[in-house]
Image (cartoon, rainbow, N blue to C red):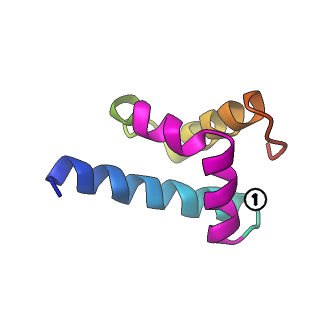
Amino acid sequence: MTKTERNLLDYIVVCISEFASRNEICMREAYLYLKKYKGIDFLKDFYDVEHTLSFDETLYDLASVCQKNGGIIS
């Protein structure tokens, strides 16, 4: 695994953790939700931009992407 891949993986794990905490759900539920509604794909595709933003902005973006794909958590 390259350093860039490791950084991406670490970032995704932290985002899942923050999303879970903010929405008062467990990590597993957060992961499954983000996976189902394309939040994980979004983080992978836009890592280069998203990792430069605050977690508040990233969590807002994640919620927006998931809602556009049928999710209900805001």
Whole-percent x, y for residue 70 in the image: 80, 35
How many other residues sit within 10 Å of disc 1, few (<14), some (14-19) or many (≥20)?
few
Instruction: State the residue position of label 1.
Output: 23
Name the magenta segment's main secondary structure.
helix
SS category of the residue bearing label 1: loop
Q: Which one is in front, 3 or 19? A: 3
Q: Quadrant of residue 28?
A: bottom right
**Residue found 25% across the figure and 50% down from its top:** 5
Q: Quadrant of residue 65?
A: top right
Magenta range is: 26-45
Whole-percent x, y for residue 59 in the image: 61, 43
**Residue found 25% across the figure and 57% down from its top:** 6
Is residue 74 positioned above or below 27 on the image? above
Answer with left or right where residue 14 lies relative to residue 51. Answer: right
Answer with left or right where residue 17 lies relative to residue 13. Answer: right
Whole-percent x, y for residue 38 in the image: 61, 39
Is residue 36 positioned above or below 68 on the image? below
- Assess whether residue 44 is covered by the magenta stretch: yes
Q: Which one is in front, 65 or 35? A: 35
Tell me which amino acid carries mark 1. Answer: Asn
